[in-house]
Image (tube, rainbow, N blue to C red):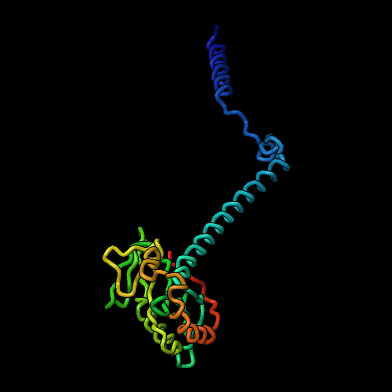
């Protein structure tokens, strides 16, 4: 075989090798989409509706749980009194009014309740202007609620005639005081122990004396739009 024939054979081999190594041609985008299986509209709609339904069920469950917790808190407070009013505005004697979460008629007279739902460890004291809350990675402060409680007690006393008046700042179980409770501060669980309810028959004379000024106080307050309790997460 001549030199020319050998060179031609080698060129043919190289050409065949290059053709075999070349990548397969890519499908155009429209061709690739056309190659996908058809979309089942009915199945897709059913999946979307199922997701919406599950999300709605979760929302309703959370809403019902919060509602039950709120009702349980209200019952825990109002169960400590012979009578009560909730979420009212009390005249402050200066042309304004103060929101009060609860007014209870108890064996010890009227109790002003400031209910707080604060989550985390709370560090506060009688002489501190700001109380600090630490809840995991969160850290924030809120104004010492004692001053506001004293103002509410004074406003109620101005309307209660000879009825004794005191007040408490009540925190739900979500809040903890590692360093101890400040003055006039209670947990919701201990409220009933401090203000136990006796049988009405055993204190009928006392209630008879206290009913007129209590009714006068109830007639002097007006409904408030503020919700209870004030929640801090």
Query: Is residue 18 rendered to the left or right of residue 166?
Result: right
**What residue is rendered at 54% in x and 61% in y?**
67
Query: Is residue 69 rendered to the left or right of residue 52?
Result: left
Q: Residue furthest top?
A: 1
Q: Nearer the viewer, residue 214 or 223?
A: 214
**In the picture shown, does residue 137 fall above or below 195?**
above
Q: Nearer the viewer, residue 12 or 212?
A: 212
**What residue is rendered at 49% in x and 67% in y?**
74
User: Can you tell which quarter of the image residue 184 is in?
Assistant: bottom left
Query: Is residue 51 rendered to the left or right of residue 182?
Result: right
Q: Residue furthest bottom?
A: 94
Location of the C terminus (image quadrant): bottom left
Measured from the top left, where is residue 150 in percent x and y?
37, 82
Q: How many marks?
A: 0
Q: Nearer the viewer, residue 10 or 32?
A: 32
Measured from the top left, where is residue 217 in percent x and y?
49, 85
Measured from the top left, where is residue 102 in percent x and y?
47, 75
**What residue is rendered at 45% in x and 65% in y?**
76
Query: Is residue 184 rendered to the left or right of residue 85?
Result: left
**In the picture shown, does residue 152 fall above or below 194?**
below
Measured from the top left, where is residue 110 in percent x and y?
42, 80
**What residue is rendered at 31% in x and 65% in y?**
177
**In the picture shown, does residue 94 fall above or below 229?**
below
User: Can you tell which quarter of the image residue 194 is in?
Assistant: bottom left
Location of the N terminus (image quadrant): top right
Q: Nearer the viewer, residue 193 or 198?
A: 198
């Amino acid at each position: 075989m001549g030199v020319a024939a050998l060179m031609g054979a080698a060129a043919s081999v190289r050409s065949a090798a290059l053709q075999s190594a070349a990548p397969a041609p890519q499908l155009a985008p429209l061709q690739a989409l056309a190659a996908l299986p058809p979309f089942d509209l009915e199945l897709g709609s059913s999946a979307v509706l199922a997701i919406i339904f599950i999300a709605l069920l979760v929302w309703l469950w959370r809403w019902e749980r919060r509602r039950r917790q709120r009702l349980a808190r209200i019952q825990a407070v109002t169960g400590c009194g012979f009578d009560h009013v909730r979420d009212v505005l009390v005249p402050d004697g200066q042309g304004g009014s103060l929101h009060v979460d609860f007014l209870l008629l108890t064996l010890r007279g009227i109790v002003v309740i400031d209910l707080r739902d604060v989550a985390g460890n709370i560090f506060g004291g009688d002489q501190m202007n700001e109380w600090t809350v630490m809840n995991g990675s969160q850290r924030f402060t809120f104004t010492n609620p004692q001053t506001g409680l004293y103002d509410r007690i004074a406003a109620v006393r101005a309307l209660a005639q000879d009825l004794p008046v005191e007040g408490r700042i009540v925190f739900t179980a979500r809040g903890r005081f590692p360093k101890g409770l400040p003055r006039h501060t209670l947990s919701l669980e201990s409220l009933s122990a401090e203000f136990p309810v006796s049988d009405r028959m055993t204190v009928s004379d006392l209630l008879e004396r206290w009913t007129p000024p209590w009714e006068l106080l109830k007639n002097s307050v007006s409904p408030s739009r503020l919700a209870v309790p004030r929640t801090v997460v």
